[in-house]
Amino acid sequence: MQLISKKLVSRLHGSKAIGHYCLGCDDLHFILLTYKGKHCNFDFNLENPTFEGAFQQVWGETPEERRLCRYKIVQGSIRYFSACSHEYAGSSLNLLEVPQTIIEDYEISPSEKP
């Protein structure tokens, strides 16, 4: 993985995706650039990105542990749906910079300077 801006990470191995930090989940979420043969509409604005469509992350082994994060990203704002399992459900926040602890935990490489 590589940091491509202060707010976004690229995953170039396996399924190509763009990652961002989610404050509610305190983790990275990835948006696939191609899914079921269709390209994701990403405007390539690395500071205030827009991705067309809604995205969700689901985790937890059992129904009791199940958690959901459903959101849209528009002009650098993450808009959480009310169905989210965390405290930011129903609210909008500016995308945050990827925290240093996440960069270290995931061993994310710094961006390449031209």
Image (tube, rainbow, N blue to C red):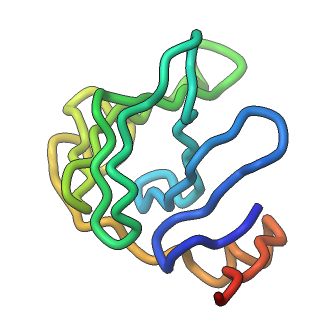
In the drawing, does residue 98 fall left or right of residue 96?
right
| Image height of 101 relative to 54, above or below | below
Q: Quadrant of the C terminus?
A: bottom right
In the drawing, does residue 9 fall left or right of residue 21?
right
Residue at (58% x, 10% y) in the render: 36
| Image height of 20 relative to 47, above or below | above
| Image height of 66 relative to 93, above or below | above
> Would residue 88 be seen by someone viewing this image from the given angle?
no
The x, y position of residue 18, in whole percent, is 56, 50
Residue at (30% x, 50% y) in the render: 87
Q: Residue furthest left?
A: 91
Of residues 67 and 98, the one drawn nearer to the viewer in this rendering: 98
The x, y position of residue 15, in whole percent, is 73, 33
In the drawing, does residue 49 fall left or right of residue 36?
left
The x, y position of residue 81, in whole percent, is 22, 33
Residue at (44% x, 30% y) in the render: 40
The x, y position of residue 82, in whole percent, is 20, 32
Of residues 107 and 111, the one drawn nearer to the viewer in this rendering: 111
Of residues 47 and 88, the one drawn nearer to the viewer in this rendering: 47
Q: Residue furthest bottom?
A: 113
Q: Quadrant of the N terminus?
A: bottom right
Q: How many circles with numbers are drawn on the protein? A: 0
> Would residue 20 be seen by someone viewing this image from the given angle?
yes
Residue at (31% x, 28% y) in the render: 54
